[in-house]
Amino acid sequence: MTLPILGARTDIRLPAYDPADVRVGIVHLGLGAFHRAHQAVYTDDVLGSDPTWGISAYTQRSARVRDQIGPQHGLFTVLERGNRAGPLRVVGSILEARAPSDGPGAAERIADPTIRLVTLTVTEKGYRFRGGGLDLRDPLIQADLARFGRDRPRTVVGQLAAGLELRRRGDAGPLSILPCDNLPANGATVRRLVRDFCAALPTAVGDPLAAWIDTEVAFPSCVVDRIVPSTAIVDLDEVSRLLGFDDAGAVVSEPFSQWTVEDVFAAGRPAWERAGAVFTTDVAPYEAAKLRLLNAAHSLLAYTGALSGHDTIARAMTDPVLADAARRLMAEDAVPTLTLPDGFDVEDYQRTILLRFADPALGHRTNQVAADGSLKLPIRLLDTARDRLAAGGTPYWVALAVAAWMVYVATRDTVQDPLAARLAMAAAGRDTPSALVDALLAVREVFPEAPDPVWREMLIEHAAKLL
Ligand code: NAI
Ligand code: CS2
């Protein structure tokens, strides 16, 4: 794909700048679908007024996306599907698409003085946290610690720490690290993980690095929201038809997009507010609302929907029982636990979420949302359950979602989850609802506390019905 070929097309939105004028200012880790349809688009919107924020993006586990968009000079299209979909859009903000084995590696790129910001979308499991801190028992973390400064790091936290160490040594100046995954306090969390990594290094190396990070590196938190299903063959076919040629790196997205960002950057930032991002001093209330309303209802629909034979979230929403459960989970269980920002219309927020989920144009697979439940449940559902139980409430709909996860784990041949083997072993041969619930409640990585008796009874009641 080249821009001169597209230049004559008025039905396609093209970058409002010449990519040849743009310089790299951002390193992104995790070149998946979401980054291309979210941060890359916001950045594309502002490069015309400030061309110093082009993106150097690194895939993490495979070279697939590098191979898709690299030969297209980093260009790719975003196809919006659904109500109020905009025109097909070509995005030019990714100037470099690299795989972990390419040179220079992510750490070397982070150390370049022209880089002022690192963004990440590496999924919940990419951070390798456990019990609130870095999982120091993880073999790849151990390998990155043992080979620090010698081999190319393989974990995300290892890449950040190695990049920061090279930056410190090269006196390359301050930097911000902005994680864009669905994690609570994502900036503070990543700061903690990087600090844990430093603390596990020999003190002669780790201490000066940690001290430098404390003064030179900012870790803003942000809340991202845009539903971006993994691209299907039918999507690529539609893009080909609309473009008149193939785009191997196209992504599909709903038209809706939101980004609320904590405005604490150490070395400047793109003026993303011009593209609709909202900068604020405290993202925590927005983040709790998003995780406990949208993501919680999404997980409920994913597990109950998959168990009912629905392959997409929109199909699950056509079942009035499931749609009502999603609505009531938000309204009855989650809303009472939230401290909402001033002026936040929580009724409208919930209504909009359900409309977005129900849009049949977006084929968001239930199994995609169901993946990695052991990491998603605590953040989306268990915090709400804990708060409601502590207030004397009965989080009935949250219990339905968690019980549906348990039955999903017990009845699928394969489950995509970093704890899949452990969960399968726990669930194996548990023939009664109570045996299944007790076996999975005993998985401490997911349920760190002894179960509340009311909560356990609700889970058993739901599991019995679901089974
Ligand atoms: P994707 O599957 O297209 O890309 C995932 C990226 O994460 C890939 O670059 C992959 O290599 C990397 N990754 C996965 N596991 C990893 C691991 N163990 N270590 C290091 N890197 C790893 O997924 P997509 O759609 O880009 O979503 C990624 C994340 O973005 C989500 O998990 C979520 O946190 C966030 N997000 C996604 C939204 C969506 O609708 N797709 C919306 C809001 C946030
Ligand atoms: C989804 C989210 O895959 C999932 O677990 O719940 O990625 C969801 O699509 C986004 O958070 C929407 O912003």
Image (cartoon, rainbow, N blue to C red):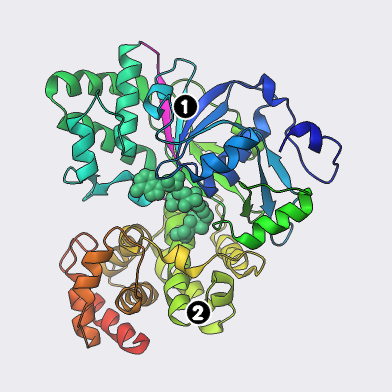
If you read the primary sequence from the N terminus, does the residue marked by circle 2 or circle 1 appear first?
1
Q: Give the amino acid type for the residue marked by disc 1 in the picture.
A: Leu
**Residue 29: image location, x then y, percent:** 44, 37
Query: Residues in magenta?
Result: 171-183
Q: Is residue 267 left or right of residue 352?
A: left
Task: Tell me the quarter of the image containing the N terminus.
Answer: top right
Residue at 68% of width from left, 52% of height from top?
A: 79
Q: Nearer the viewer, residue 274 or 127?
A: 127
Residue 322's disc number: 2
Give the quarter of the image for residue 109: top left
Residue 446 visible to an observer of this rendering: yes
**Residue 370: image location, x then y, percent:** 42, 66
Q: Which residue is mark 1?
A: 117
Q: Is residue 459 left or right of residue 369?
A: left
Q: Is residue 93 magenta?
A: no
**Residue 446: image location, x then y, percent:** 24, 62
Q: Is residue 467 left or right of residue 38?
A: left
Number of numbered discs = 2
Q: Nearer the viewer, residue 21 or 351?
A: 21
Label 2, secondary structure: give it: helix
Is the stretch drawn in magenta largely helix, strand or loop?
loop
Q: Is residue 174 magenta?
A: yes
